Image: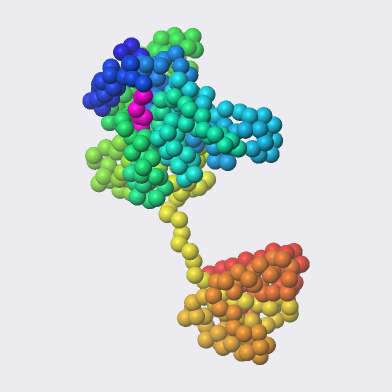
Amino acid sequence: MKHLADLLGDSPGIQAIREKIERLLSRQQDARRLPPVLIEGETGTGKGLLARSIHKAGPRPDGPFVDVNCAAIPETLLEAEMFGFERGAFTDARRSKPGLLQTAHRGTIFLDEVGLLSEGLQAKLLKVLEERTVRRLGSTRDEAIDVWILTATNEDLKSAIQGRRFREDLYHRLAVLTLSLPPLRERGADIVTLAEHYLTRACTDYGVSAKTLGADARAALAAYPWPGNVRELANLMERVALLSSDPVVTAEALGLTVAASKPAPAAASAPTPGPPASSLDDAVRDRVADVLRQTGWNISRTAALLGISRNTLRARIDKYGLREGEAPAPPPRPERHLNVVLVSVESLGAEFLGAYGNPRGLTPNLDRLAREHVDRRGRGRLAGVDAARRADAALVEGQDGDAVACEPVSLEEVLAARARTTAVDEHQRGVRPRPCRE
């Protein structure tokens, strides 16, 4: 099929997808109902391109193709966008509007990142699949639709089902036919084929002289792990077409850093400041961190260089715990259980009201003083995190409450923290006392 020619490559994974689509479409030319198709694959593998190719090669190429990125539309608006609404359904709904599902009538709708749908929208989408009808917000009647539903996700939906983030019945409805796009690093010789295709197209589009890939550039492309997959490769070829002045592109012109490439076999025994990347996640994390440092943490430029969207980049920054000015951050620190002394604001740091935390970490004198002052004032002993939160909230709101001085503390440090001048200054400025230094 000519429309599937856009799906470049001869690797086994791509050939299997092409054959499966051809078998499906050869039997569906006169079908009254088309089966839902779920496309799986990492970010940047070409799920959107594959969906468009299926639509063009299918029985409804002249019908509408509606592309919906579920991650790009706020959850509060997604329901109204997908299902439509009636006049007066909510504030400022001054006229009725058909949803995207109705817009795709007698055509195809492509739901990208379907794994991010909320539980409520999953239930409504399941009803659409089962009954082939939609009900607009604010309406009391169902309207029939005839839509071919294609969906895509870069998440493992089976794991999401186990984690109760995705409905199992919806998964089985969507996955009547499943197509799994392989990541670029597993496509072998397809990498160079795609690179040459995108380089030629970029040179033509930008009106620059034609360029070819040198032998060292081909080797560098084949060895690179490609965390951004095909999208990253396409962006790299555009950059090379614009910036390289030589007719033959070298590995140096590609600018693929050693840190992001596959480590050499001998590098495992060589002493390095940190452990080498031991998995794909390590390679992706190191590549993202390296490009972030190169761009000075400019999100837009980094996303463009990696060939991924800004939302995907932010998700990876959160996933790997990356922070500006740091190397790939260590795992999030566990919650600290500190020993804390509560100091009376009423007397501006002159009396102890109690202590909480790990009593064994307090000095005996400090614990004894805390108990004596608590008993003498008849206020009762403050204990636990909840008591500290109440005291801290009272201090922030300017009420008569308790200031918090954080541990590790010695008796001398606490006595110094009780100094009237410091307590008066912090109380008047409305700031929380800072943790004592270890």
| Residue 253 picture location, percent across and down | 41, 23
**Vertical comparison of 215 with 369: above or below:** above
| Residue 210 picture location, percent across and down | 41, 9
Query: Foreground: 117 or 261?
Result: 117
| Residue 50 picture location, percent across and down | 37, 23
**Vertical comparison of 179 with 414: above or below:** above
**Residue 299: in sight, yes or no?**
no
State the residue at coordinates (50%, 80%).
Answer: 359
State the residue at coordinates (36%, 47%).
Answer: 161
**Left or right for 63, reference 369:** left
| Residue 20 picture location, percent across and down | 26, 24
What range is drawn magenta here?
33-39
Confirm whether the magenta stretch covers residue 38.
yes
Confirm whether the magenta stretch covers residue 86.
no
Query: Foreground: 285 or 248?
Result: 285
**Vertical comparison of 90 with 14: above or below:** below
Query: Foreground: 44 or 74?
Result: 74
**Residue 29: in sight, yes or no?**
yes
Q: Quadrant of residue 217?
A: top left
Query: In which quadrant of the rendered image does the N terminus lie?
Result: top left
- Residue extending farthest front: 141
**Left or right for 164, reference 302:** left
- Residue extending farthest right: 428
State the residue at coordinates (48%, 28%).
Answer: 144
Q: Quadrant of residue 423?
A: bottom right
**Left or right for 180, reference 65:** left
